[in-house]
Amino acid sequence: MFSSEPTSSQLVLDLLQAELGEVVSADPALLQSVRTDKSGWVAPGAPLAVVLARTTEHVQSAMRIASRFRIPVVPRGAGTGLAGGGVGTDGALVISTELMNEILEVNPADELAVVQAGVINQHLSDVVAPHGLVFSPDPASKAISTIGGNIATNAGGLLCAKYGVTREAVLGLVVVLPDGTLLRTGRRSVKGVTGYDLTALFTGSEGTLGVIVEATVRLRPIPSGDIVTLGAFFPDVRAGAAAAAAITAALIRPAVMELMDHASLVAIDAYSGTRLSEGGGAYLLVQTDARGAAEEASAISEILTRLGADVRLARDSAEGEALLAVRRNFHPALASVGDVLIEDICVPRSRLAAMFDAIDEISRRHGIAIPTVAHAGDGNLHPNFVLPPRSSQPATASSEPNEQWVPASVWAAADELFVAAMELGGTLTGEHGVGVLKKRWLENELGPQSVELQRGIKSVFDPQSIMNPGAVF
Amino acid sequence: MFSSEPTSSQLVLDLLQAELGEVVSADPALLQSVRTDKSGWVAPGAPLAVVLARTTEHVQSAMRIASRFRIPVVPRGAGTGLAGGGVGTDGALVISTELMNEILEVNPADELAVVQAGVINQHLSDVVAPHGLVFSPDPASKAISTIGGNIATNAGGLLCAKYGVTREAVLGLVVVLPDGTLLRTGRRSVKGVTGYDLTALFTGSEGTLGVIVEATVRLRPIPSGDIVTLGAFFPDVRAGAAAAAAITAALIRPAVMELMDHASLVAIDAYSGTRLSEGGGAYLLVQTDARGAAEEASAISEILTRLGADVRLARDSAEGEALLAVRRNFHPALASVGDVLIEDICVPRSRLAAMFDAIDEISRRHGIAIPTVAHAGDGNLHPNFVLPPRSSQPATASSEPNEQWVPASVWAAADELFVAAMELGGTLTGEHGVGVLKKRWLENELGPQSVELQRGIKSVFDPQSIMNPGAVF
């Protein structure tokens, strides 16, 4: 019998390798790569090993050993997170579900699919497209992020105002609990109210309760009819935010409604050679779809024109795609000049203009540029901080990387953003998650009592507190 | 100091009355009325008292006293539940939120409302209609059920396939916990992923975790455009179920798609003087709405005609309403001849025909008629058992009512229905809840491990297990 006391890492590694063979790796380059995600955060220290699981049984074996020796476990998908929620912390066992990438079932009659956690979001949509179906959740990372990761963070995206967030697309889960047992949640029917909604509890739980290995997800019909795209320039972002609110107030729900401020347009111009920033102080990009798309676009165009915007309707889908490419170039544009801290606040839709005011005020007072884009249809803003690139000082396993890459002055400004969002009735994270980066603000939003109850829920599933102990709580 | 030991009921009642005055009632007629709900179940014994709360503070005071003396508490709305989830069990303190019926805020710009738990579902829709908005959840009881009760059961209805269930319409809650403290969950923004989704956890929790006193709910634009209604007769219900599946498979999502079997049509005819049962062996009622309604209805009509149905398109909305009235007359028709046990299974949509086969087989083998209607768009069936009326033997506080009103032979048939639904990948309750009536099947569906974890979650919120102890678990 082995003791349940913490013991030497080497023993645990030997056991893992004896049981899982090549599925376990302690390759220094791999250990190094899982210390970070797309947030830019690099965890201090080095993880113990990475389990590159190909089957549910691999995950179960790894969890049994981790549980026996109380080794911290970090579940990880493709590593595209933006809050440090899936990074290999010091001494942790990283369980990657990235190679569990099989689509187990596509059922067009029931408009559902059963997938392993590592299936790439876009890949599922590609596979079901011939049936006229789509997997709706559309984080910006959908070409590279896994469905397991999307569920663990309850990922959002551009289409949420009309088509919902990830939670609304998940019917059931298979989860490996810390002790290695399997838990099935939910069902294959679209309705069902037997017991508590554990599926929703795991959705957005950021790897703190167990490892999601399989999901039954809803598919939706691809909207029929045309897609119509239009862009509109405004004198300033406040006017753009008011216009977006006017569209919502007119009871129109576009598929896409993205607002970019002037600093964003300047960054895009520098990157793409466009001259958008000369067109106005802000740019609102709207796309309508399904039956009535043209009618809706025309109503939107009227509203925007009445509000003084310079509106340009795309003549065809190619021009529409070109307009969307403007938005898609935003993050590459910022990333080309520095390391980017992408923030993710969300406010009630009517407070979008007020939030832009607050960002402007904070930006001026701190003397820090905060280029911001917003999913204007649901009040979700991404203010960005561009930091000097670290590429000249690559982090290696031997040299301690600069995990404190975000200077205190930037965190001070970010802190004020979070407070302002909460004061407006919003949240410090609309779709990216708490991860490690926003832990210190968790209680500000939830209050001590809710945090205590949530810790209590965590301890029901994870009594030894080995699941992603560095994140969220 | 009072002891935390159980103590005499009279002392607790005195304390409640000292603190809450006329808000507390032990009126025998009231105590009698809260022993049952629309399921027909009557709880054995008598509750201690009813708190007719008008404020959150009333609920908090009552919970503090109940908690101190470990008195079981049953939260209750309008008493329209169909699973005995809100009935006053023996010795329990019933906390009714029915009189907490104030709409605290209507915010058209953010498409949300803040309501007390006792606001009637339809009343909210009536109040927000002038803004072009609607509260989407539409249980059949919406004219008489409270939003708090809708949330506690995650109520469904006719429009779910297109417009979602209650969970999708709830942004945040205020809950009184067993110790009397207030918990706020969720937020006013449409997105947000800070911490676990406690809002979803409380939605459908059937009063087992706390008392929901306030909710921030989403409103949606009333669908623009026409409403088109059509009805179609089929030789048998299997053909009707296959036709409903064909509509879904054609990627059309009607607002309403209701299927009635022949026994249902016979019952409706006897009640309404109609001659529907002569039209065919089953009737499918379909309603399309929003932009493209006519186009969708025409595509549906073609599909149904091709499948051999006798399709009749309503000429106008009045005729459409008349067709819908057929469906609405179903339960009154059954209730006019006996007491009705309404079941509520849900299967994947493609298994609807298979489930009707199973119902037919069970009905024949047991020699019991099981008239059944289905929300065909989401695979949710309501098989009904009509029992001899008890009205000739009214239950009173003094004479023990017949709580075992459903004979064992009927439960045996119902048991087989549940098993068949689960074998088809479905659930034993699509929208009514577990309550007291389906407790004994809970573990069959969820498995012992899930039930144990759910009990663990309950104990985090309700360590003394005083919340609705007779229900669900």
Image: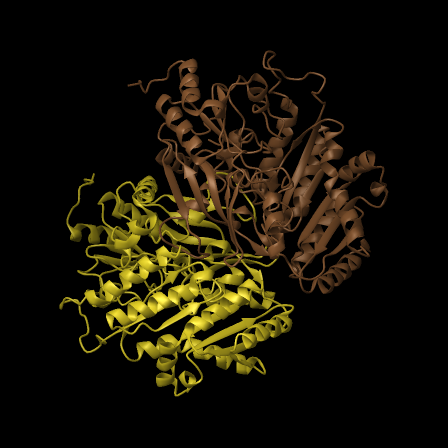
Chain colours: A brown, B yellow
| Residue sitting farthest toward the left | B399
* Total numbered labels placed on residues in the image: 0
Is A173 placed above or below B311 here?
Answer: above
Is A93 placed above or below B40 here?
Answer: above
- Residue A196: x and y, percent? 38, 48
Location of the N terminus of chain A (image quadrant): top left
| For residue A373, side relative to residue A97 (left or right) | right
- Residue B230: x and y, percent? 54, 77
Identity of the residue drawn at 58% across and 82% down: B316
Q: Nearer the viewer, residue B391 or B441?
A: B441
| Residue sitting farthest toward the top | A398
Q: Quadrant of residue A191 in the image?
A: bottom left
Is A19 placed above or below A285 here?
Answer: above
Identity of the residue drawn at 26% across and 50% down: B469
- Residue A94: x and y, percent? 49, 26
- Residue A15: x and y, percent? 40, 19
Identity of the residue drawn at 45% across and 84% down: B279
Q: Nearer the viewer, residue B191 or B164?
A: B164
Residue B62 in view of the camera: no
